[in-house]
Structures are given as structure tokens and as C-alpha cells.
């Protein structure tokens, strides 16, 4: 026979009151510790924090209640915050910048991957709480605006500074009230699919890195290696083609021979990496194959930072996107690529800057108004050697009002108020059409008579402007008018006088320098750093933040 156990109501109430008192007392002890720690000016673990004032104000506003701890250890929210710090590497950031080592030092099982936080003293609990809060502020800032200030690093970064009205304290209050840490921080990501795809690609690279057993000593290649030739770099390069799964392992009698099997694998690799699949190992191929998974993670990290620098824009709008490092122009509409063309960009000493400006008109059969710098550096010395140089190049001299004057009556090296221009025609350096998006840098997109240059793999060859292949097709898609058919466009491009045609809308032109991006399928793409901008950014990105270095 079952007997019911009857517990007096008074005992239940007494137990409940005792538990409430116990947890309140423990909470009270921690809030007192927090208040004591934060009461002084920049004390404790926040001694060198960039956000000490915001943190003190935040906790004062919530009566020093903790956010990341519950019952003396990490709460669900705290665990989520720790995971976000660890996963910041997928954003190309360094988890160590967000107090990770100091947080791990407080764990009760430091040697294990899954960290636990048990039996902490009151001081350790407060330190853990404040370290995570400082991490939240710093990580929020770096995800939204970038860790590095572009204006102090890259003189060719001409985008306007990213405007923001985000209040990190308000974001933390949302987290404290139950919002997901992951979703809250993800709301700060750049509003571009490129960032989301890039993050997934970096995750994949970290997985690949775990299985990396190769040595990545630099395999130097001078000149070019063709199939059938021998070279000491071939064994290492063969292993790397196998590592990237474009070549299956196979036995070879002479490891130093560039054989036909390796030739086929190399062509696959070249095609997959945006190179001309000619099966020749030149400097560009060797540079690419010398990149270990860690090198690729670094390159990806650099470009994720560049995306964080970008001002907010509608990436779904109609736009012209030029990736200088990829030598490519894409006309985009609703995130779809409607037109693609090869481009030629500025030489290493005439680097094309990165910026955005609205395209508003097209000039058919243009004059080339030669910049003063080119006139001084190239035109005048040529005229001094050959008095007929201007007429041979179909050039003329005009005065300040645009009137043509006799070149023989002007001494360009001494007289001011004159400029040189090249008349319309097939030999004009701008080609037969130019596309104008007025800006402070005198950069525009134009045709070129030297169309054979588009066959080159490296196309940093201009004075800074963007030369485009198939300009007639580009003009047709921009005009978007049935009256502008192929015949009319060709006629406009081959006149003796220039014709200005205003577009019926302004189209944003965005010039970027991206040596890495990932496409919609998650495939990572890497390009050569032709302007050598990556290393200085990598150094700044990998340098330690000063926030809590000496705490």
C-alpha cells in the first residue's frame, strides 16, 4: 500500500525563501564586486580598455547586474559570446584581440578544447564578466568599421568614411535582454553577399589547413617552365597541384620533369584561378602555387577588412563594378552580371585609386585632353626631339578658351595657358569612346587603340584610367535605348568631332581592389597583389590591439 508523504506548507515556503535568499545573496556579492571594480577610474581589467567609460555607464544603468554569468559560471549568453570571439577568425580577425587568452586563463580546464568555468573566486567572476563585455565592444566596432583605419594606411583608398549611427551600448542592452549574440553581431556585417560568401570560404580554408601536411618552402621560378622541361621546383609544385585536388597522385620516373600529366593538372589549376590556361609555369603561376592555406587565409582576411571599410551602399542596384586586381569590369543589375569585360588599369607607379562616383554621360569620338603631367613628362621631350611629333600623333595645341593655335608659335616648356589635345580618330589614346563619371581623380573608362594588350594576363599598363574591351557593347547596354543600335553606335564612334550623350539616369561606378572574393557557390578566388597593397594591411591587421595589453 502506497503512503503519501506530506510535507508541511511552511517547510516548502521556508525552502523557497532560503533558495531565493541564497541566489540573491550570490548575485548581490557579484554585483557588489562589479560595482567596487568599476567605481574607480579605469581600474582592474579595464585599466587600458578603449571602452571603460561606456562599460561603467552600462553596468551602472543596470545596477551592476551581470550579463554573461549565471550561478557562478558562464551562462548560455556567455558561452555564445565566447564562441563569437573564437569564430572571429572567420571574419579575418584575430580572436586574441578580444581577450581570448585572458578569458582562457580563467577556465578550470585550460588544456581542453571545450572550456569550463567553475569554482571561480569573486574576483575571477568579475574579471570574466568585464573581459567579455570589453570584447563585445571591440568586436562590434571591428566588425562594423574594420580594425584598421584605411585613411592612415592606404593613400589610394578614396571612398568616403563609413557613416554609422550604431550605439554599441544599446546593442549590448539588447543582448542583456535576451537577444542572440550571434545575430546581434552579424547585424554589423557589411550589407554585401560578398562578405557572407567570404566568411564561408575562410571557414573552408581553415578545414583545409587542418589536413595540410606539406612543407611550403618557396619554390622559386625565374622565367617560364614549359612541358617537357626539367626544373628543381617541379617536385614541390606537383605536390601542391595534388594538394589542391587538380592532380591525382601518380608515380614518375623523373620527379623534376614537367610531364604531360602535370601539364593537364596545371591547366585545370590555371582555369580555376582566373589565369590563361596555357600550361606554362610562369611567375604568376609560381606565386599562386607558393601560397599555403595560411597564406590564403591571410589574403582573404585582408579583403574582408576592405569590405568592412566600404561605405554602405545598395549592392542590388544597377552599378558598374571594376575590380582593379582582377582586371575586370562587371555591369550589375539586381545582383546579376549582365555584361563583363576585360580592363587595363594603372601601372604600378600610376595606380588606379578605389572610390565610387556616378556615371552620367558618354563621349563618342572624344578628344583626349592630355594631362599636364603627361605633357611635361612625355609630350614636350618628344616635341623637342621631333618638331613634327604633334602632327604625326594627330595632336593640336589649344589656348585657355579652347581655340586651336599653331603649335609652332607656342613654347610649351615655357609658356602657360596652353594645353595639348589629341583629335578624334582611330589613333586617339582614348580610342573611340569614353564613359564619364566625374571625380576628383580625373579617372574615367575609355576605349583604346592598343586592343592586343587585352590578351595579356597582367594588365597594369595605363596612366590610371580604366581601358575597356568591347566598349561598343558597353555603350549599348548603358544607353538601353532601341534607337541606339549597333549601326548608330559605330557611326557615333567614328566621327571627326566628339559627341556627348547624356544618360537618362546616373549609374554608380565602384572601383575596388580585391585580391580575394568568394562567389555565390562559395568558391574562393585569389588574384595577384599587383600594387603590393596587401602586406602593409596584413601587418596592421595582425598587429596586437592595445586595449587590454597591459591589464
Image (cartoon, rainbow, N blue to C red):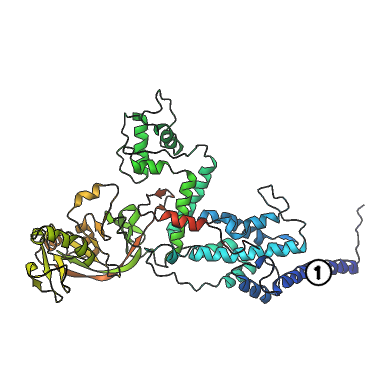
Q: Residue 475 occupies which quadrant of the picture? A: bottom left
Q: Can I make out residue 518 in this image?
A: no
Q: Position of residue 165 (x, y in %)?
A: 50, 74
**Callout 1 crowding tier (Cα within 10 Å): few <14, some 14–19, many ≥20:** few
Q: Position of residue 352 (x, y in %)?
A: 31, 60
Q: Residue 314 occupies which quadrant of the picture? A: bottom left
- Please, what secondary structure does the residue beneath circle 1 have? helix
Q: Is residue 189 left or right of residue 14?
A: left
Name the residue that disc number 1 marks: 25
Q: Position of residue 109 (x, y in %)?
A: 72, 50
Q: Can I make out residue 338 in this image?
A: yes
Question: Is 100 rendered above or below residue 149?
Answer: above
Q: Is residue 407 left or right of residue 286?
A: left
Residue at figure coordinates x 70%, y 74% from the top left: 40
Q: Quadrant of the C terminus?
A: bottom right
Q: Position of residue 147 (x, y in %)?
A: 51, 62
Amino acid at each position: 500500500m502506497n503512503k503519501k508523504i506530506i510535507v508541511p506548507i511552511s517547510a516548502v515556503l521556508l525552502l523557497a525563501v532560503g533558495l531565493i535568499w541564497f541566489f540573491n545573496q550570490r548575485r548581490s556579492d557579484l554585483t557588489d564586486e562589479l560595482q567596487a571594480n568599476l567605481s574607480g577610474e579605469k581600474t582592474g581589467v579595464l585599466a587600458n580598455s578603449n571602452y571603460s567609460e561606456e562599460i561603467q555607464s552600462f553596468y551602472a544603468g543596470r545596477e551592476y547586474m551581470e550579463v554573461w554569468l549565471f550561478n557562478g559560471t558562464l551562462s548560455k549568453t556567455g558561452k555564445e559570446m565566447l564562441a563569437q570571439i573564437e569564430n572571429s577568425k572567420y571574419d579575418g580577425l584575430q580572436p586574441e584581440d578580444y581577450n581570448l587568452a585572458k578569458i582562457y586563463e580563467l577556465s578550470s580546464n585550460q588544456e581542453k578544447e571545450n572550456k569550463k568555468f567553475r569554482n571561480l573566486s569573486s574576483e575571477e567572476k568579475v574579471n570574466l564578466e568585464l573581459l567579455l563585455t570589453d570584447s563585445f565592444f571591440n568586436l562590434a566596432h571591428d566588425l562594423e568599421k574594420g580594425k584598421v583605419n584605411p585613411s592612415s594606411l592606404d593613400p589610394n583608398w578614396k571612398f568616403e568614411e563609413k557613416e554609422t549611427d550604431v550605439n554599441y551600448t544599446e546593442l549590448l542592452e539588447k543582448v542583456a535582454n535576451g537577444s542572440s549574440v550571434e545575430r546581434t553581431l552579424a547585424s554589423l556585417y557589411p550589407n554585401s553577399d560578398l562578405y557572407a560568401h567570404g566568411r564561408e570560404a575562410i571557414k573552408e580554408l581553415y578545414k583545409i589547413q587542418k589536413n595540410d601536411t606539406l612543407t611550403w618552402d618557396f619554390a622559386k621560378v625565374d622565367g617560364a617552365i614549359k612541358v617537357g622541361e626539367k626544373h628543381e621546383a617541379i617536385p614541390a609544385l606537383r605536390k601542391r597541384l595534388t594538394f589542391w585536388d587538380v592532380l591525382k597522385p601518380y608515380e614518375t620516373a623523373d620527379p623534376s620533369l614537367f610531364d604531360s600529366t602535370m601539364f593537364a593538372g596545371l591547366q585545370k589549376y590555371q582555369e580555376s584561378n582566373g589565369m590563361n590556361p596555357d600550361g606554362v609555369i610562369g611567375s604568376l603561376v609560381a606565386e599562386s602555387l607558393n601560397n599555403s592555406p595560411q597564406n590564403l587565409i591571410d589574403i582573404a582576411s585582408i579583403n574582408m577588412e576592405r569590405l568592412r571599410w566600404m561605405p554602405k551602399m545598395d549592392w542590388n542596384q544597377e552599378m558598374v563594378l571594376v575590380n582593379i586586381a582582377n582586371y575586370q569590369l562587371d555591369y550589375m543589375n539586381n545582383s546579376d552580371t549582365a555584361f563583363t569585360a576585360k580592363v587595363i588599369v594603372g601601372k604600378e607607379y600610376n595606380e588606379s585609386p578605389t572610390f565610387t562616383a556616378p556615371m552620367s554621360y558618354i563621349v563618342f569620338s572624344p578628344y583626349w585632353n592630355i594631362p599636364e603631367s603627361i605633357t611635361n613628362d612625355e609630350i614636350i621631350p618628344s616635341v623637342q626631339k621631333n618638331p613634327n611629333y604633334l602632327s604625326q600623333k594627330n595632336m593640336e595645341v589649344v589656348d585657355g578658351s579652347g581655340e586651336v593655335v599653331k603649335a609652332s608659335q607656342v613654347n610649351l616648356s615655357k609658356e602657360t595657358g596652353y594645353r595639348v589635345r589629341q583629335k578624334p580618330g582611330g589613333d586617339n589614346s582614348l580610342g573611340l569612346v569614353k564613359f564619364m563619371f566625374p571625380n576628383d581623380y580625373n579617372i574615367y573608362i575609355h576605349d583604346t587603340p592598343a586592343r592586343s594588350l587585352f590578351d595579356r594576363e597582367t594588365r597594369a599598363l595605363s596612366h590610371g584610367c580604366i581601358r575597356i574591351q568591347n566598349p561598343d557593347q558597353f555603350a549599348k547596354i548603358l544607353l538601353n535605348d532601341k534607337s541606339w543600335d549597333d549601326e548608330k553606335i559605330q557611326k557615333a564612334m567614328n566621327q571627326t568631332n566628339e559627341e556627348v550623350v547624356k544618360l537618362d539616369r546616373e549609374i554608380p561606378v565602384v572601383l575596388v581592389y580585391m585580391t580575394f572574393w568568394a562567389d555565390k557557390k562559395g568558391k574562393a578566388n585569389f588574384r595577384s597583389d599587383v600594387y603590393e597593397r596587401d602586406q602593409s594591411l596584413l601587418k596592421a591587421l595582425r598587429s596586437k590591439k592595445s586595449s587590454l595589453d597591459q591589464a
